[in-house]
Amino acid sequence: MAVVDRVRDLVAPIVADAGAELYDIEFTGGVLRLLVDQPGGIPIEVIRTIAKATGRVLDEADPISSRYTLEVSSPGLERPLRTPAHFEQAIGKLVSVKTVVDVDGERRFSGTLVGADEGGFVLGIDGATRSFAYDDVSKARTVFEWGPNPKPKSGANRPKKEAH
């Protein structure tokens, strides 16, 4: 069983008990990263609770033979997309994709995620659609779209006139 799978078995109940979702687990370069979430965003107190409980369980079970650093955080605004479930949750959102090999001379694509299933996903790009297999993708994430800056209220930035 892979490290990530052993860790998932150990920490999934902790995350569920905290009322959160285990979004993803990544183990690379000596860093074990747990991404946890709740509808509407996850408070830092919940992340702290999960991190403490996870640290204790991992110390007891010792599923990783080498030294590592544990990180517990939110997936953030620009979320990594690695599983079919991640892609299904992101339908309708702007997504950035990097492929393993060139596809029609390109490796980077950006568009609206219009569909996803167990085999792959579909992006809407410039009025057309393009299908991708998960195995052809090296990296994918949602892209946070910043809205326009709010206009200042009228007179808010004008200096006040002095009374005479």
Image (tube, grey):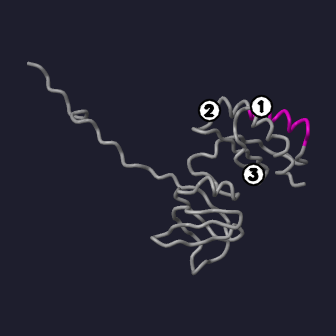
Q: Are marks 2 and 3 in contact (CB under 8 Å)?
A: no
Q: Amino acid at mark 3?
A: Glu
Quadrant in the picture for the C terminus: top left
Residue in the picture at 64% in, 54% down: 80
Write down the region rendered in magenta: 50-62
**Badge 1 is on which residue?**
52
Secondary structure, mark 1, is helix
Secondary structure, mark 3, is strand
Crowd band around label 3 with a 10 angstrom C-alpha radius: few (<14), some (14–19), many (20+): some
> Could you tell me residue 159's position as x and y percent?
20, 31
Residue in the picture at 78% in, 52% down: 27
Give the total number of marks visible in the rendering. 3
Label 3 to label 1, Cα distance in Å? 18 Å
Is residue 106 toward the left or the right of residue 60 in the image?
left
Q: Looking at the picture, does residue 49 appear above or below residue 68?
A: above
Label 1 to label 2, Cα distance in Å? 15 Å
Magenta-drawn stretch contains 132: no
Front disc: 2 or 3: 2
**Badge 3 is on which residue?**
26
Q: Amino acid at mark 1?
A: Lys
Front disc: 1 or 2: 2
Is residue 53 toward the left or the right of residue 158 in the image?
right
Is residue 12 toward the left or the right of residue 124 in the image?
right
**Badge 2 is on which residue?**
43
> Could you tell me residue 141's position as x and y percent?
60, 57
